[in-house]
Amino acid sequence: MTKKPTKQAAPPILLREDQRVTASIPSLSDALAGERLRGVIENYLSYYASGEGHTARAKRYDLQYFLEHIAQSPERINYVLVGEWTLQQTQSFVDHRLALGEAPSTVGRRLATVKHFGRTLAERVHGFINPAREARGPVQAVSRPHGLDADEIEALHWAAQPENSGKSDPFVAKRNQFLVEILLATGLRADEVRLLLIGQISEDLHWLKNVKTKGRKFRNVYMANDLQNTTREYLIAREQELLSRFPAYEALSPVQRSAFPVFVSFYQAQLSAPDSFGLSPKTVWRIIAQTGKRAQKNYVDLLGNLHPHRLRHTFAHGLLDSSKDIRLVAQALGHSDVRTTMRYTERTEEEIARAIEKKNSDNS
């Protein structure tokens, strides 16, 4: 007697790039509609927001608030189905966050997270239509990001020097100086710098290889000649400090050492776990903020509120002024869409007024 074949279970909802659902499963969209939204969100977050960086945390908050909005009550959070997510719910979420007094830029970011979540599902589940695709975010005036001017940059260089840091630990002072200088010289994001491994620095100290950027993309980042001496001095000090604190470090092979972070902290660090030597996101922000406050001694401005992204803006403005090439700047910053970079070309009303006056005087 021939054994009757057993009915196969429906395949799970897969979100990874290497597990895309194909058009050969037409009923999977209906199956997804009956899934609990929280579980699908957690599946998405485990791949796109598993880290401790600012962007990952923001994504988790965005989708948690979105889920709470659809649920309307704490008791329903675990029982909301994907099928309850509609365009109207998405637009209502945007309006609700604005009504709470959130900045349009924050609400726009939250909507971008929800849209990416929906687009990810649509790409991987045949027949699923992103409910957030047509949702409209708040209209925001495009403004040019603020960088530092020449005097502020000079004051920051002064404040970053180890002898002006006020740090009793010479190595920490040198590490913090290199952190400031590399952010200024490369335009890297705070997390991109924080997660750098020693094996990513080229032998000639000119390149940071395979820097992980947003969207799980990678790029090579150039380090100019001006940064070489600071880089070399820091790497020597770093190696000496590791050998001093962890004698067993000397026995590690070059391959093993290459897995350690460039910027090291020794709080609760274990030689068997290279990741434990990394700086936390808060530490990076605190180092930059403290350096900005010291810089105020030489220059009175908003340097006391300094954050890593302002150093990125400073790099972008400098590179755009020297190259006059917006696409080149986009690639250097790791922007996937040149429209993001176009913000640096925005002009103030005063600049427009001066340009008009100059035009009129030239024609008179």
Image: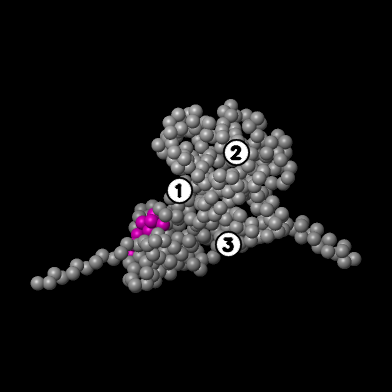
Q: Give the residues drawn in magenta, as a range.
A: 33-44
- Number of marks in the rendered image: 3
For image coordinates 45% across by 55% down, the residue present is: 48
Residue to which mark 2 is pinned: 232
Q: Nearer the viewer, residue 143 or 55?
A: 55
First-in-chain label (3 vs 2): 2
Hey, which quadrant is residue 2 in on the image? bottom left
Whether residue 16 is visible: yes
> Secondary structure under badge 3?
loop
Q: Position of residue 30 (x, y in %)?
A: 34, 69
State which quarter of the image contains the C terminus: bottom right
For image coordinates 60% across by 54% down, the residue present is: 333
First-in-chain label (2 vs 1): 1
Magenta stretch holds residue 41: yes
Q: Position of residue 164 (x, y in %)?
A: 66, 31
Q: Nearer the viewer, residue 346 or 236?
A: 236
**Kind of residue indicated by mark 2:** Arg
Magenta stretch holds residue 136: no
User: Is 278 situated left or right of 305 in this image?
Assistant: left
> Secondary structure under badge 1?
loop
Give the label on residue 51, or none. 1
